[in-house]
Image (spheres, rainbow, N blue to C red):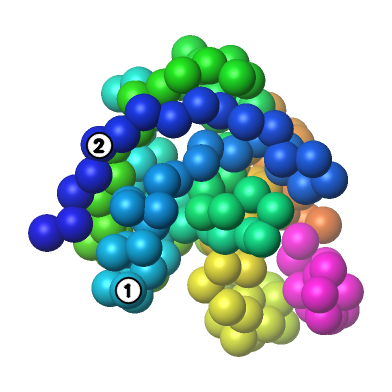
Amino acid sequence: MLNYKFQSTVCRVEGAMNPHGIPVPYEVSEPLRKAGVRRLLVKVNGYELKRGLQGSKEFGSHLVVGLGLLQEAGVGPEETIQVEIVPDPNPEQIDVPDELLIALEQDEEANSRWKSMTLGKRRGLAYHVSTAKQENTRIKRVLDIANKLRTGTIHGD
């Protein structure tokens, strides 16, 4: 089984929408890529999260993390961290917030469009809803997403 532990440093990724990344060494990323592993279970200083292995010419292999996740993990930018990585045994599982599930059950058109989207796109939309701290904000985001699904105006459509 592919199981890796290493030290890394949280870095800024200039020009990126989510500007923090955790570089993944080549000796870790290459066997994962060769095995076709894209989704990972990651521990950062003991804090667990699910991430996809990303890659770019400018930054190399890395895990994208937002400032909020870093704060939850008790980590700041430029800090050295302990990282553990294993392949996600359920890479197609998406944690969909209850508010979004209810909206999709009630809106056939939005649900149909949702089902036609890639896992990554659905995962991103679910994450957008789940990161709202207040219920009113989650509901507002769900209504906006349902409308955009129904009208085909989600970014990238």
Q: How many marks?
A: 2
58 vs 10, left or right, is right
Please state, as top left, top right, bottom left or bottom right, where the N terminus lies in the image: bottom left
Which amino acid, by three-letter code, is at mark 1? Lys
Q: Which residue is mark 2?
A: 5
Residue 89 painted magenta: no
Q: Nearer the viewer, residue 111 or 89?
A: 89
Mark linked to residue 34 = 1
Q: What residue span does the magenta drawing correspond to?
A: 145-157
Please state, as top left, top right, bottom left or bottom right, where the C terminus lies in the image: bottom right
> Picture quarter containing residue 14?
top right
Mark yes or no: residue 93 visible: no
Q: Nearer the viewer, residue 129 or 22?
A: 22
Mark linked to residue 17 = none
Instruction: Identify whether 104 is placed above or below 97.
Output: below
53 vs 148, left or right, is left
Q: Determine the CA span between mark 1 and mark 2.
A: 18 Å
The x and y percentages for residue 109 are 71, 83
Q: Nearer the viewer, residue 58 or 66?
A: 58
Which type of secondary structure does the marked residue at label 2 adopt? Answer: strand
The x and y percentages for residue 58 are 70, 53
Residue 149 painted magenta: yes
The x and y percentages for residue 104 are 61, 68
Residue at image coords 56%, 28%: 10
Residue at image coords 23%, 61%: 89
Q: Residues within 10 Å of mark 1 (few under 14, many from 20)?
A: few
